[in-house]
């Protein structure tokens, strides 16, 4: 059977596209454009996605969503490729930490930030001041401190080795890529984080990343929430 990545433009599914290119996998790519008005996934995409979210991978009758579940499923098909340190490897703990931080801690914070921004833009004018004040307090007390802690941890770890799980790229780097791109766009990663900036430059120079960009049809990753 052939894997098929159902890829939504400007979404987290780019990471799966990069992974497939990195593995030299045999796969089909079906690209979906966002609704021009809502910027959400089109009905055709939601019809195949169990959660109506990106990414989605199909393999025959199997339909699988959730980024990290898809990554693990794909890596299971390529056990000979060392993109996932084995149990007992020196970099296994770092790998597990960053692999799960990507979706468990990092992306939720970015999502909250995006949702808050969307709400502020949509509330009636007479409520904007109140909502802005409330969200600013939540941001200062919760979102920004937690995001800064993640970025500082990333900065430290990337000062110890080239990639998130040692001196060679792993699936942890692939799943962290979208959130790190978004963190830079949102101003969380600055010139005060040279190791994070160096890591971002590294992924942009990766041949498989560049190949994925060509198939995706975009020149750069744009965070849209």
Image (tube, rainbow, N blue to C red):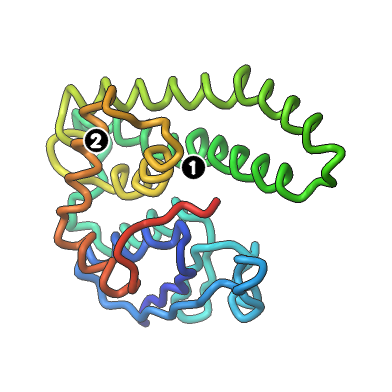
Q: Residue furthest front?
A: 125
Residue at 59% x, 38% y: name it: 113
Residue indicated by mark 1: 103
| Residue 143, image quadrant | top right
User: How far apart are the alpha carbons under marks 2 and 1?
Assistant: 21 Å
Residue 154: x, y in percent? 32, 27
Q: Nearer the viewer, mark 2 or mark 1?
A: 2
212 to 82, vertically: above or below: below
Asked if residue 73 lies left or right of residue 195, the reply is right
Where residue 187 appears, as percent x and y from the top left, is 42, 34
Element assignment for label 1: helix
Give the image location of residue 39, x and y in percent: 60, 66
Figure check: 156 above or below 117: above
Q: In this orientation, which residue lies closer to the viewer: 195 or 70?
A: 195
Seen in the picture, residue 67 relative to 56 is either above or below; the reply is above
Nearer-the-camera pick, 69 or 41: 41
Secondary structure under tag 2 reads helix
Whether residue 151 sits left or right of residue 209 in the image: it is right
Residue at label 2?
A: 197
């Amino acid at each position: 059977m052939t894997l098929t990545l159902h890829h939504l433009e400007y979404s987290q599914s780019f990471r799966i596209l990069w992974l497939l290119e990195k593995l030299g996998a045999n796969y089909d790519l079906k690209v979906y454009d966002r609704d021009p008005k809502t910027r959400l996934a089109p009905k055709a995409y939601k019809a195949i996605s169990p959660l109506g979210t990106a990414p989605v991978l199909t393999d025959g009758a199997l339909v699988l969503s959730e980024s990290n579940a898809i990554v693990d499923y794909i890596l299971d098909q390529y056990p000979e490729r060392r993109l996932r340190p084995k149990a007992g490897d020196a970099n296994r703990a770092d790998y597990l930490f960053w692999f799960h931080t990507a979706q468990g801690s990092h992306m939720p914070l970015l999502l909250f930030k995006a949702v808050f921004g969307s709400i502020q833009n949509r509330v009636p004018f007479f409520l904007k001041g109140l909502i802005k004040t409330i969200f600013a307090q939540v941001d200062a007390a919760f979102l920004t401190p937690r995001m800064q802690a993640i970025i500082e941890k990333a900065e430290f770890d990337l000062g110890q080795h080239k990639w998130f799980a040692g001196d060679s790229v792993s699936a942890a780097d692939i799943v962290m890529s979208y959130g790190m791109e978004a963190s830079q766009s949102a101003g969380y990663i600055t010139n005060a984080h040279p190791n994070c900036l160096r890591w971002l430059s590294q992924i942009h120079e990766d041949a498989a990343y560049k190949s994925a960009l060509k198939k995706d049809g975009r020149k750069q990753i744009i965070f849209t929430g």
